[in-house]
Image: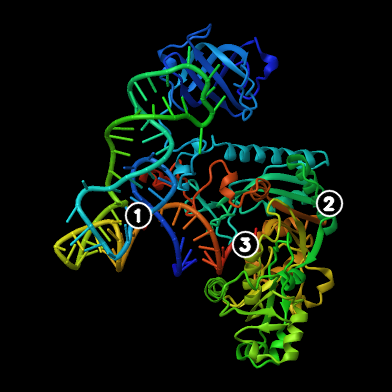
RNA sequence: GGGGUCGUAGCUCAGUUGGUUAGAGCGCCAGCCUGUCACGCUGGAGGCCGCGGGUUCAAGUCCCGUCGACCUCGCCA
């Protein structure tokens, strides 16, 4: 070994011992020609090592040529630091190592940015020099946290008879859902594998095969546009169970969440987690993934808007739209007219809202440019409906149900954050259940699966399957944490006839279904147990536990928004020879 | 595909109504300093102002295009 101890390990009890440390030169301080201090760093910490020609340690020309990020090995004696010389900022600050022998293991070029201290460089540079960025303590900690979370998950499932089973990365393309990443086949000209969007079908087949408790830390791939919380490849904690009902999955995952939160962050999560229906959260928060660390619920005043004299409100309510609003407690003085008329109006505009109406509660009445369109009685009704008090700011969006949902949900999140309505370090995990089975796709003239085509319709809604499919609830559930979708799952169809009915509903005809999913339908005909499952977004969980709002901060080698890897240069062009082998011809050369 | 922010020294940024020699802090290099630990002091080097075109007597600054990073709407069963 090139070391006897790590750089975070030595304490005053080690005084007098001769030790060998290896690590990176974190900082270098020369004190005249005969005294040099180096803070030596590894992933465990930092230790001050001293080169001093005055006593029994040595200093030579090599020591004076050390530079930041050089990798060295030192052999020396652990000494207590003298009175007033210890450093309380370092865990090892009570001691230092007097160096007798120095070995330069590796020189470093001057780093393009500072490892610690200084402002963060732009992300492009950080990604190009990811090996340096990863040396920074914050990023380093995130990767360690990710490891701890992954191991806690394995521990939890292993103790409960779950089996970790791998499924293929090279699979079959299914045109539903997200765009696939495709891999051309050399031996089958013109044919392609697809990278999995999730192991969904494989895990269902594993249930048919009798592995009644499965989990996998599974890499998934989706070729869609990216966001701060989305990467083209990401990791799911994938789970499936046989002979269970919805409640069994929810309580199992309740257990997982509280186990993991306790284990990696020492946070107590009370279980069972609260459950809300889809309909409920959409009405109250406008969003199927509400941040419930704060209240500020949406209030509907469509009925009151219908009878007032304000043209916009009247028109919207009489044409089937909705008028809904938020009460920003004590917000009347906090939002200037400019902020309301320009900033917030443009903000809700991004979600399709054509305007933002606002009123202030002043002296028991509404104060607003539109207040004159409301009678005294109507004003009192609005105030009482909105639970308005002196100094409150009432914000309204009048539009379709969908637009009021989107605009008010976004507005609620923004105001909650900028008015500090919650503790940003806290956690609130909830279940959202009873999603619609399908949603109408006007462009294609058919229904689309809300979750996926294998999701069990709620038996209570069976009568609507043929008459009014939009009303059918799915036996599905999302786990929502602080406004992020942290997991999603459902009870699966285990009956090939029910599966066929759903395919019919989705206008996937039998031939097509047979072609795309025939292997699953066939499996379901050979004795499929009732089964259900869920997948948790590992990256998002790590992100939340790390207190971050960017998923790239918890992935060792993430990609940019255009799915490029700045470190390796992927994706890249390839040799013509490789293309010929794969029977591929490129029609448009890449831009240079 | 749409909207927005950004791109000036190795890094983070400033740069006025277009004006003659483009600055600061950190980092880097050299010298000094025997108890520093965000060490200190003195001196120095370092610029295709993302790229291409245009307007102008004159462009880091104005216009058009383009590339890249980030945020976001659509999209993500």
Q: Does A294 appear above or below A142?
A: below
Q: Quadrant of residue A418?
A: bottom right
* Distance of label 3 from label 2 (alpha carbons): 28 Å
Select label 2 or label 1 by which is in front.
Answer: 2
What is the x, y in percent for residue B15? 33, 56
Q: Dot 1 lies on which element?
A: loop
- Name the residue at 65% across, 64% down: A413
Q: Position of residue A398 (x, y in %)?
A: 63, 82
- The reply to whether residue A585 is visible in this rendering is no
Front-most of residues A317 and A329: A329
**Element at label 3:** helix
Q: Which mark is residue A51?
A: none
Disc with the residue nearer the chain's start (1 vs 3): 3
What chain letter is assigned to the residue under label 1? Answer: A
Callout 1: 10 Å neighbours few (<14), some, many (20+)? few
Establish whether labels 2 and 1 are both on one chain: yes
**Left or right of residue A443: residue A471:** right
Determine which residue is flagged by label 1: A591
Pick the residue in front: A489 or A244.
A489
Residue A364 visible in image: yes
Marks 3 and 2 close (CB-CB < 8 Å): no
Instruction: Work out how far the residue at label 1 is from the one at label 3, CA to CA, in angstroms.
Output: 42 Å
Which residue, given by chain and number where applicable, does mark 2 sit on?
Answer: A270
Among the two numbered marks 3 and 2 on one chain, the one whose residue lies closer to the N terminus:
2
Q: Position of residue A268 (x, y in %)?
A: 81, 47
Residue under label 3, please give it: A418
Q: Position of residue A342 (x, y in %)?
A: 52, 74
- Mark 3 residue crowding within 10 angstroms, few (<14) / some (14–19) / many (20+): few
> In this rendering, is residue B74 above or below A217?
below
Q: Quadrant of the N terminus of chain A?
A: top right
* Number of the front mark, 1 or 3: 3
């Amino acid at each position: 070994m090139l070391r006897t101890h790590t750089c975070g390990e030595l304490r005053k009890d080690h005084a007098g011992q001769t030790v060998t440390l290896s690590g990176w030169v974190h900082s270098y301080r020369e004190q005249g020609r005969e005294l040099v201090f180096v803070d030596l760093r590894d992933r465990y910490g930092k230790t001050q090592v001293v080169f001093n020609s005055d006593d029994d340690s040595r200093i030579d020309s090599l020591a004076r040529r050390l530079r930041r990020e050089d990798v060295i090995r030192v052999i020396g004696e652990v000494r207590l630091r003298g009175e007033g010389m210890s450093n309380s900022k370092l865990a090892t600050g009570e001691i230092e190592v007097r160096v007798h022998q120095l070995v330069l293991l590796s020189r470093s070029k001057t780093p393009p940015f500072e490892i610690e201290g200084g402002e963060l460089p732009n992300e492009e540079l950080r990604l190009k020099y990811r090996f340096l960025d990863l040396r920074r303590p914050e990023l380093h900690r995130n990767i360690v946290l990710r490891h701890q979370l992954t191991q806690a998950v394995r521990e939890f499932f292993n103790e409960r008879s779950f089996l970790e089973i791998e499924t293929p990365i090279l699979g079959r393309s299914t045109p539903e859902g997200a765009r696939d990443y495709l891999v051309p086949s050399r031996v089958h000209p013109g044919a392609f594998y697809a990278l999995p969007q999730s192991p969904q079908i494989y895990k269902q087949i594993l249930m048919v095969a009798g592995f009644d408790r499965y989990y996998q830390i599974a890499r998934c791939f989706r070729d869609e546009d990216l966001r701060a919380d989305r990467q083209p490849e990401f990791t799911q904690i994938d789970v499936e169970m046989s002979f269970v009902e919805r409640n069994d999955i929810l309580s199992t995952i309740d257990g997982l969440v509280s186990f993991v939160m306790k284990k990696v962050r020492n946070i107590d999560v009370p279980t069972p987690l609260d459950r809300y229906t889809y309909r409920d959260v959409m009405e109250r928060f406008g969003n199927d993934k509400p941040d419930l660390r704060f209240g500020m619920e949406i209030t509907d005043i469509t009925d009151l808007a219908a009878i007032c004299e304000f043209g916009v409100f009247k028109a919207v309510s009489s044409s089937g739209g909705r008028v809904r609003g938020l009460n920003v407690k004590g917000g009347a003085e906090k939002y200037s007219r400019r902020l309301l008329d320009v900033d917030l109006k443009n903000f809700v505009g991004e979600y399709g809202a054509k305007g933002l109406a606002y009123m202030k509660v002043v002296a028991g009445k509404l104060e607003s440019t539109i207040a004159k369109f409301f009678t005294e009685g109507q004003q009192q009704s609005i105030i009482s409906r909105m639970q308005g008090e002196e100094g409150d700011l009432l914000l309204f969006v009048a539009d379709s149900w969908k637009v009021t949902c989107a605009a008010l949900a976004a507005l609620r999140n923004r105001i909650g954050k900028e008015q500090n309505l919650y503790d940003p370090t806290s956690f609130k995990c909830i279940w959202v259940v009873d999603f619609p089975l399908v949603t109408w796709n006007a462009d294609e003239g058919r229904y689309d699966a809300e979750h996926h085509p294998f999701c069990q319709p709620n038996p209570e809604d069976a009568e609507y399957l043929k008459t009014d499919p939009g009303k059918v609830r799915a036996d599905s559930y999302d786990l929502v944490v602080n406004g992020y979708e942290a997991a999603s799952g459902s009870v699966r169809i285990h009956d090939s006839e029910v599966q066929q009915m759903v395919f019919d509903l989705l206008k996937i005809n039998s031939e097509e279904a047979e072609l795309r999913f025939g292997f699953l339908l066939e499996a379901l005909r050979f004795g499929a147990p009732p089964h259900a499952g869920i997948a948790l977004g590992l990256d998002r969980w790590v992100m939340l536990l790390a207190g971050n709002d960017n998923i790239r901060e918890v992935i060792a080698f993430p990609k940019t928004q255009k799915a490029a890897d700045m470190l390796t240069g992927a994706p890249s062009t390839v040799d013509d020879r490789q293309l010929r082998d794969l029977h591929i011809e490129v029609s448009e050369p890449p831009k240079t």
